[in-house]
Image (cartoon, rainbow, N blue to C red):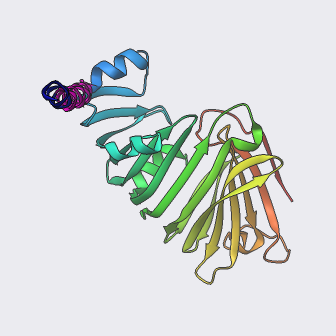
Amino acid sequence: MPQASASSHKRPRKLWWLIGFVLFALFTLLQMPAAWVIEKYAPESSYVQHVSGNLWQGSVVWQLPVSIAPLTGTASWTWQPWQLLLGKIGADVDIRTGQTRLNGQVKVGHRLWQMTDMNGQIAPETLAKVVDWQLPNTPIQVNSVSLQRRSGSDANATGFTQADGQLTWVGGEVGYPSGGKVFYITMPTMQAQLSAEQKNSKNLLHMSLLNNQEKRLGDLYLDGDNMLDVNLTQRLLENMPEYKGQAPQDTPVVSVRQPLLPGSSLSDSGMR
């Protein structure tokens, strides 16, 4: 009996040693410099300029070649350890560039990434670096935007499989160059309602453009290859002084297909 009692006291000690070792290993992992991880897994990334902190909490200076003058900014993160129970790596993130600021949660899992409850605003100077247009000095408000995008060999399970949230813009006069001439249109106050939609066996991000009366202004579709389809209605084009077309207001009169980011030519475009 005394021997059995002694062995029963040793087993919990071994278990606590194991738990302590696991916690120590996890703590050591989280204290690993983030710069080392980036150097190991993305050694030639041109988007990352400087990394500080560790896996638990840190920041990075990033740069995107979206125009002649690259768009630069910072991103900071705080790890969410409970996401490991769901098989994902998650973090609270704060993204800044100029007056643009976005904050929310980013999660990465097996062949998927998620952006959850993203809020903030995209400043007009940020937009000006993405599109070569004359834009009004008004930001786009980002309200509780959530996205989920999957990758893989199954076309029916890849692309944007979940989307929710809203973008709002007070609009103003927009001038865009075309054929050596600048065309102007007075954009009304609008909102973009986000949803996921399956079209032609592809999972697309759908942004439905509506005015204050929730009347249709157009639709934007983004596929998994970062190609953007733009459809604009007669109702929106009536705000362009030089436009003389006549059609029912809900009729799409402009259709354009182009890469999401500039630098490539239009794949397909047309006007009806």
- Residue 149: x, y in percent? 59, 44
Q: Quadrant of residue 38?
A: top left
Examine the rendering and report whether any part of residue 48 can be seen.
yes
- What range of the chain is rendered magenta? 10-33
Question: What residue is rendered at 82% in x and 51% in y?
Answer: 270
For residue 135, side relative to residue 258 (left or right): left
Quick one: quadrant of the N terminus?
top left
Q: Magenta stretch containing residue 31, yes or no?
A: yes
Task: Single out the residue that lies furthest toward the front.
Answer: 1
Residue drawn at x 54%, y 66% as measured from the top left = 173
User: Which percent across, then down, holds residue 3?
Assistant: 16, 24
Q: In the rendered image, which quarter is residue 44 located in?
A: top left
Question: Foreground residue, 156 or 7?
Answer: 7
Asked if residue 133 can be seen in this view, the reply is: no
- In the foreground, 87 or 108: 87
Q: Is 119 left, or right, of 54 in this rendering?
A: right
Residue nearest the viewer, comparing 36 with 268: 36
Q: Residue at x 75, y 50 (%)?
A: 256
Query: In the rendered structure, does residue 235 fall within the stretch colored magenta?
Result: no
Name the spot of residue 154 as percent of width and height, x first.
75, 36
Q: Give how far across and how far down residue 261 sits, in percent.
A: 58, 40
Q: Residue at x 50, y 68 (%)?
A: 168
Which secondary structure is most common in the magenta stretch?
helix
Q: Is residue 5 left or right of residue 26?
A: left
User: Outermost residue, bottom direction?
Assistant: 213
